[in-house]
Image (tube, rainbow, N blue to C red):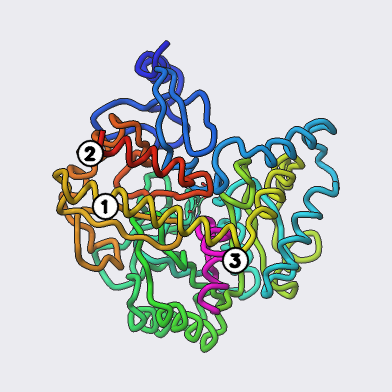
């Protein structure tokens, strides 16, 4: 069966034919490609066509598909069994490796997704402070649990409403929404809710609704406000962790969060999330502390083995190469766009994340995005897909460079663009 037939069949058995909404190609010119193989920077679909992949499973595959060393580690771990629900050395080794490399982390707990990690961070922040409310920024994504499926309301500043059906008004009421970049608003909201706010949650490099690069001074301002009000600052580095350098944005900016969440790269392409921070906070978690958290498959040995090799391969030299690869890819795409009907586009880049968007002015908050971005992305996506270049199938998603997008892949990209 080809992709189209497989998708039609999927629609019968799976809601919308997909297990995560963004995979559905909704609003695009065609139906999803069913991928049957990946290698390096390339993926192949059931129709026999290959693509240079700039989605890379939305980030985890920083060394490309089927990296031989990661594959070997996975096979080796599998050889001993794949889950025990008991203590094992794989997760200890990964914990030790990360804690020794990131200065503000003393302890880490592994889970199975980024959503779980942030969900636990919310509960932990509430447990530590004894306060009910959290601040979240418009345009940041923190996973799909109730407290974070919240958008700005139409009324008062900070007031919020659910962005999904099924989230109660009570849950929405404990999440306060601010605009990125607006420190005054954050201060006002703290003043309006004295001793009520447990934590500020932010993607220090917001990369789930375009790439909304923030000033360091804004992040530092949040740090200062949290210090003043004895609230916690939580960096959600599920995308940026181990990508913008090993220690993510915390290391890059020198601004230390109280808690940090990881996912994506930390599992090497296996399902993993993690919550980390200083011991004094982490030991609020069960079984030491009163904040409950658990998981049948948490710290899964195969995922831990994959994650460890994934991270060990991220040497300083690898980051230099990763940056260079992405810079070259962006230059090739930009040049082609400017001469082939996408003159309204520019490509925003931060390290190995990039975001093609039909605007030339600065993008720092979600409301800056142009109204016709959906229609323009649809056109760009179609041209690229036909050329064998696979972007994440939604106009809000960033592109992911990888170490597999090497000179050879770049030459192939140039080839495909101009063909
Ligand atoms: C991907 C992502 C999540 C959710 O992680 P899942 O593993 O998809 O549950 C949370 N926060 C950020 C910043 C992310 O990029």
Residue sitting nearer the eye, 170 or 310: 310
Q: Which residue is mark 3?
A: 260
Crowding at mark 2 (Cα within 10 Å: few <14, some 14-19, many 20+): some
Q: In which image quadrant can residue 344 be found?
A: bottom left
Which residue is depicted at the point 53% across and 37% down? 40
Q: Which residue is mark 2?
A: 378
The secondary structure type at the circle numbered 2 is: helix
The circle on residue 334 is 1
Q: Nearer the viewer, mark 1 or mark 2?
A: 1
Above/below status of 254 relative to 313: below
Which circle's residue, 1 or 2, is located before the other in the chain? 1
Q: Quadrant of the N terminus?
A: top left
- In three-dimensional space, the C-alpha distance between marks 3 and 1, rounded to whole angstroms, equals 34 Å
Q: In which image quadrant can residue 418 be found?
A: top left
Q: Which residues are magenta?
A: 234-254
- Percent of width and height locating residue 411: 39, 41
- Percent of width and height locating residue 46: 44, 18
Left/right placement of residue 48 relative to residue 341 reads right
Which residue is depicted at the point 41% across and 27% down? 50
- Percent of width and height locating residue 109: 71, 57
- Percent of width and height locating residue 28: 26, 34
Which residue is depicted at the point 60% across and 42% down? 269
Q: Do residues under tags 1 and 2 come within 8 Å of each other at their CB atoms?
A: no
The secondary structure type at the circle numbered 3 is: strand
Residue 235 belongs to the span the image colors magenta: yes
């Amino acid at each position: 069966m080809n992709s189209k037939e497989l998708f039609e069949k999927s629609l019968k058995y799976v809601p919308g034919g997909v297990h995560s909404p963004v995979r559905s190609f909704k609003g695009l010119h065609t139906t999803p490609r069913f991928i049957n193989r990946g290698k390096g920077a390339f993926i192949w679909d059931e129709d026999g066509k290959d693509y240079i992949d700039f989605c890379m499973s939305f980030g985890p595959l920083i060394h490309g598909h089927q990296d031989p060393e990661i594959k070997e580690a996975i096979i080796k771990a599998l050889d001993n069994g794949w889950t025990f629900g008991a203590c094992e050395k794989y997760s200890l080794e990964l914990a030790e490796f990360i804690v020794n490399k990131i200065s503000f982390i003393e302890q880490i707990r592994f889970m199975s997704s980024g959503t779980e990690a942030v969900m636990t961070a919310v509960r932990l922040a509430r447990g530590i402070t004894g306060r009910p409310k959290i601040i979240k920024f418009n345009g940041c994504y923190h996973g799909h649990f109730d407290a974070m499926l919240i958008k700005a309301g139409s009324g008062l500043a900070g007031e919020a409403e659910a962005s999904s059906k099924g989230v109660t008004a009570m849950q929405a009421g404990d999440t306060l929404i601010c605009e990125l970049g607006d420190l005054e608003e954050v201060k006002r909201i703290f003043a309006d809710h004295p001793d009520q706010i447990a934590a500020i949650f932010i993607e220090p490099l917001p990369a789930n609704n375009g790439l909304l690069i923030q000033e360091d001074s804004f992040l530092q301002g949040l740090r200062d406000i949290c210090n003043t009000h004895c609230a916690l600052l939580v960096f959600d580095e599920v995308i940026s962790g181990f990508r913008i350098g090993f220690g993510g944005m915390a290391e890059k900016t020198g601004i230390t969060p109280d808690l940090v969440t990881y996912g994506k790269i930390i599992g090497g392409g296996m399902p993993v999330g993690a919550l980390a921070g200083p011991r004094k906070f982490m030991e609020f978690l069960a079984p030491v502390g009163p904040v409950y958290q658990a998981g049948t498959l948490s710290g899964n040995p195969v995922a831990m083995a994959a994650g460890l090799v994934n991270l060990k391969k991220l040497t300083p030299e690898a980051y230099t190469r990763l940056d260079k690869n992405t810079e070259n890819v962006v230059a090739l795409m930009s040049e082609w766009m400017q001469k082939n009907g996408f003159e309204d586009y520019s490509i925003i880049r931060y390290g190995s994340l990039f975001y093609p968007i039909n605007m030339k002015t600065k993008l720092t908050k979600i409301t800056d995005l142009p109204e016709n971005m959906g229609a323009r992305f649809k056109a760009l996506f179609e041209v690229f897909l036909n050329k064998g270049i696979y972007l994440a199938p939604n106009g809000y998603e960033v592109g992911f460079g990888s170490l597999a997008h090497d000179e050879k892949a770049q030459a192939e990209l140039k080839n495909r663009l101009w063909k």
